[in-house]
Amino acid sequence: GVKKHILVIPGDGIGPEVTTWGKAVLEKIGADFGHEFTFDEALMGHAGIEATGNPLPDETLAKAKASDAILFGAIGHIKYDNDPSAKVRPEQGLLKIRKELGLYANLRPIMLFDELLDASSLKPEILKGTDILFFRELTGDVYFGEKKRSEDRNTASDLMIYHRYEVERIATKAFEAARVRGKRLCSVDKANVLESSRLWREVVQDLAKQYPDVETEHMFIDNAAMQLVKNPKKFDVVLTANLFGDILTDEASQIAGSMGMLASASIGDGTGFFEPIHGSAHDIAGQDKANPLASMLSVALMLEISFGLKEEAKKITDAIDKTLKAGFRTGDIADANTDKSKILGTKAMGQKVLEYL
Amino acid sequence: GVKKHILVIPGDGIGPEVTTWGKAVLEKIGADFGHEFTFDEALMGHAGIEATGNPLPDETLAKAKASDAILFGAIGHIKYDNDPSAKVRPEQGLLKIRKELGLYANLRPIMLFDELLDASSLKPEILKGTDILFFRELTGDVYFGEKKRSEDRNTASDLMIYHRYEVERIATKAFEAARVRGKRLCSVDKANVLESSRLWREVVQDLAKQYPDVETEHMFIDNAAMQLVKNPKKFDVVLTANLFGDILTDEASQIAGSMGMLASASIGDGTGFFEPIHGSAHDIAGQDKANPLASMLSVALMLEISFGLKEEAKKITDAIDKTLKAGFRTGDIADANTDKSKILGTKAMGQKVLEYL
Ligand SMILES: CC(C)[C@H](C(=O)O)[C@@H](O)C(=O)O
Ligand SMILES: CC(C)[C@H](C(=O)O)[C@@H](O)C(=O)O
């Protein structure tokens, strides 16, 4: 067995409720396979601000750097959303940890569980067979470019900026993944308008020459947002910038039936960071309503990507598959045909998956 | 009857094929209602570059300023898309005319024809009843902010920038429209990350106080891209920035069944500019395959918005409705249930609508 130290950062909103179950899955896997997983916990986001005034307390960053992987919950609070002039914001914690840990590649697999085909607003025949792996750049773009506000507060700007090496390193990861998947890569940009996109396209075009076995396509973001609804099956690996990736992956998550089912892995220079795609969902926080499956799937990604434990990862997705096949659902993935007695809260759903594990 | 001078700018790709039918509809309406519509034609985009080296020839701009309304086709050419280092690009013509005419508000109505419900990839029950009016800001944002490329060509940037007055004037138009529609306005931004979005949100929050009868909501762009697929019915008026609007409206067009059906109106300080949402579609250009309905619907918007001719506008949408009810389709909106003999080319479809008119 392996020895790994995992930092759990529950974060805000439904974060604590769902990471509890991600952690429980890790403990069970550790026990069953004879791995030694040790845990620590730290604050971030609104939780960090409340306790220390800082959305990414120094202690959290130090613990993050010292761990083998991080399991994160969610970030954000409605209080700041409605106050555009707030100086300190929960999201700064997430952006800072991404930057500090060099997590430049955000992998978001859009995988479908057959049982949930009907939960999507898309027609099942459009959806069936969809299997997309997004590579979203995560430490550049307009997220990290200089932000300015004029003294009279009447003008505001953000710099959308990319450096060649930033595009190269994420594109390389995407090409490598395409090579061992469907051998198709679609790079999404807005090169007909943006200079940063033209650099992006140049770099991807250059790199494509080294991957003659991968069919490379370039698509404008507006078209991609459309094609994703029209024919999601046509995509294999999608490579895109930070902002475009933020938008496209959320759109794709809905296509997949529910945000509550999707996990993401952020990797790069340092410790890997694993989190659900869903946000803090304050409207249902603390009510035992959140879907714990995305956190559990985040753990599956952690096991596979950071620890190389494929068999263990597969056990988790299999257990979730069985739980769904048995008809159990949380509210967000239930539909008119769901047996009412099988609609479970966070805890009962987490417990069910543990049983199947 | 009224007297109006209309400039037709066919543009690139399928542009000329579709504007022919928009113009034909205008001529028919003019004759039937006793209006005197006069026409001129001008070049833009790739067509402008070929003829003069300039994507927006001076003559075109002069004619545009002297006309009462502009009917535009499409812009873009694959040649430039694959050459990120091209200095002169077709799209520059479109961006420049938007700026020169002060066309800061792009209105994109997402309207559904019942007959086409099945052409969407969304389930009919999700879609039915959807009626959204987008207000996309059109002369600011990262589209027009300073673009830079470092001397070593390894760094590229675009400035995402907004001024208070730019947000105010488009937001005012959106609130006014919401007031006479469903009284709901959703403003889309990324205020949890971007300073320009925080300015955007501040301005909309301030303005909302003057419209207590309109229910105002703020949504992050990633969430909006998702909600649009999940539950398009929940939106009435959507207000957003140039880049976000570009992405969301294309996504929404697919939701509506086909890009080939959607028209847009760009208005502001000067002459109104009317165009289909679809692009130049070079793959089908010159093959009598393009859908002429969006160009005809652009004319309906022109009649209503620029000339105040509501009855005439309604005649056009009614004629299109009848054409669809009679089972006629172009390839892009045909589905498995379409009678093969009723799948028409551009010309035959244009002719059909004229008959029903
Ligand atoms: C919370 C927010 C800053 C974040 C982002 O935009 O990156 C989130 O939407 C995500 O996708 O991880
Ligand atoms: C052609 C392109 C520059 C344009 C845009 O991005 O504005 C188009 O996509 C549109 O939506 O009108």
Image: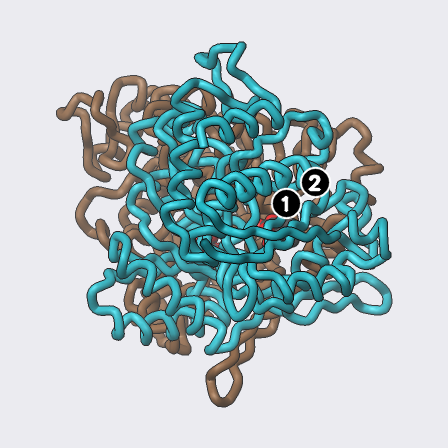
Chain colours: A cyan, B brown
Name the disc covering residue B190, or none. none
User: Quarter of the image containing the C terminus of chain B?
Assistant: top left
The residue located at (47%, 84%) in the rendering is B153
Looking at the picture, which amino acid does disc 1 mark?
Gly
Where is residue A151 shown, x and y percent of the image? Answer: 85, 69
The residue located at (36%, 57%) in the rendering is A219
What is the chain letter for disc 1? Answer: A
Closer to us: mark 2 or mark 1?
1
**Distance of label 2 from label 1 (alpha carbons):** 24 Å
Front one among A172 and A4: A4
Looking at the picture, which amino acid does disc 2 mark?
His
Ligand 1 within 8 Å of disc 2? The answer is no
Please say if A141 is above or below B26: below
Q: Quadrant of residue B188?
A: top right
Same chain for labels 2 and 1? Say yes or no: no
The residue located at (38%, 34%) in the rendering is A318
Where is residue B253 shown, x and y percent of the image? Answer: 43, 38
Identify the secondary structure beneath mark 2: strand
Taking the image as shown, residue A8 lies to the left or right of residue A325, namely: right
Q: Residues within 10 Å of mark 2 (few under 14, many from 20)?
A: many
Q: Quadrant of residue A141?
A: bottom right
What is the chain letter for disc 2? Answer: B
Taking the image as shown, residue B250 lies to the left or right of residue A78, namely: left
Please say if A298 is above or below A238: above
* Outermost residue to the bottom: B151
Residue receiving disc 2:
B218
Where is residue A110 shown, x and y percent of the image? Answer: 41, 43
Name the disc covering residue A73, or none. 1
Front one among A236 and B298: A236
